Image (spheres, grey):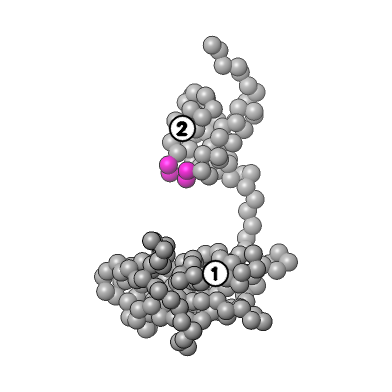
């Protein structure tokens, strides 16, 4: 059976749409060109006629994605989380690159405004999630006290984050949260102790500084 011949622009658009869908669903690295071809039934020759490489297809897929500059400064880490529970995500950063500030931004009228800042020392590996039933941030410090911290939001008139120390002096470079068997766990790569440590967090008392 002969495949119907399509106009070049239509064929190119078909390849871009298939590539975008597969990249979004699986990640760029996990999708070989052959899979894109299979999904729409075109030959390898056709693909390479339009795109010299898989990266070129990614670039073409990007052309249709809106891009917006939201921060124009040095940032080493970023997570999004709805810390105040209003249904809209805030943006949380460490600045400058592994710097000494954690900032929380809120989008207002199209621009991002800092609404909270917290001091760090060589801040590393912020992540957001739920610990002991509370929405939190977890972040490491690689110098100074080298504490591994949980930051718990409290919302009054404005957002504040209350600091709890999980472990002192460990210098966590990266952190992850895990909900396992109904319990909250923090996994931290502790540079100061050359270890990967796992902490079970049973509750978060109102305490600390
Ligand atoms: Ca929010």
Per the image, label 2 sits on a secondary structure element best described as: helix
Instruction: Name the residue furthest left.
Output: 194
Viewer can see residue 26:
yes
Residue 41 percent coordinates (x, y):
52, 24
Let me know if residue 98 appears in the view: no
Q: What range of the chain is rendered magenta?
A: 26-30
| Residue 31 lies in the magenta-colored region | no
Q: Is residue 207 left or right of residue 61?
A: left
Is residue 204 positioned above or below 22 on the image?
below
Furthest residue to the top?
Answer: 1
Farthest front residue in view = 182
Q: Earlier in the sequence, mark 1 or mark 2?
A: 2
Task: Looking at the picture, tell me which residue is in the foreground, 11 or 20.
Answer: 20
Q: Label 2: which residue?
A: 35
- Residue farthest to the right, as pictured: 109
The residue that appears at 67% across and 82% down in the rendered structure is 157
From the viewer's perspective, is residue 116 above or below residue 63? below
- Image coordinates for residue 74, horizontal then vertical, percent: 52, 69
The residue pinned by badge 1 equals 92
User: In which quarter of the view is residue 121 placed?
Assistant: bottom left
- Residue drawn where x is 30% and y is 69% of the image: 197
Please name the residue shown 42% across and 42% down the image. Answer: 30
Q: Residue at x 58, y 45 (%)?
A: 62
Q: Residues within 10 Å of mark 2 (few under 14, many from 20)?
A: some
The correct choice, above or below, for 132 with respect to 65 in the image is below
Q: Residues within 10 Å of mark 1 (few under 14, many from 20)?
A: many
Give coordinates of residue 148: x percent, y percent.
Answer: 39, 76
Q: Quarter of the image containing the N terminus?
A: top right
Numbered circles on residues, count: 2
Label for residue 196?
none
Across and down, in percent, residue 96 comes to 50, 73
140 left or right, relative to 50: left
């Amino acid at each position: 059976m002969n495949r119907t011949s399509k106009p070049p622009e239509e064929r190119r658009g078909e390849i871009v749409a298939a590539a975008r869908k597969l990249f979004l669903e699986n990640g760029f690295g996990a999708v070989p060109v052959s899979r894109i071809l299979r999904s729409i039934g075109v030959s390898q020759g056709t693909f390479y006629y339009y795109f010299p490489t898989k990266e070129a297809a990614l670039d073409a897929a990007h052309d249709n994605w809106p891009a917006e500059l939201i921060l124009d400064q040095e940032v080493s880490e970023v997570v999004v989380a709805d810390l105040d529970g209003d249904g809209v995500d805030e943006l949380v950063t460490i600045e400058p690159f592994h710097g000494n500030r954690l900032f929380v931004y809120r989008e207002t009228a199209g621009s991002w405004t800092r609404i909270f800042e917290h001091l760090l020392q060589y801040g590393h590996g912020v992540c957001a999630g739920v610990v002991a039933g509370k929405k939190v941030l977890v972040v490491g410090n690689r110098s100074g006290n080298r504490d591994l911290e949980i930051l718990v939001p409290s919302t009054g008139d404005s957002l504040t984050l209350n600091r709890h120390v999980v472990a002192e002096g460990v210098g966590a470079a990266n952190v992850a949260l895990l909900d396992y068997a109904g319990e909250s766990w923090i996994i931290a790569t502790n540079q100061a102790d050359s270890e990967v440590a796992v902490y079970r967090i049973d509750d978060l008392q109102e305490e600390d500084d």
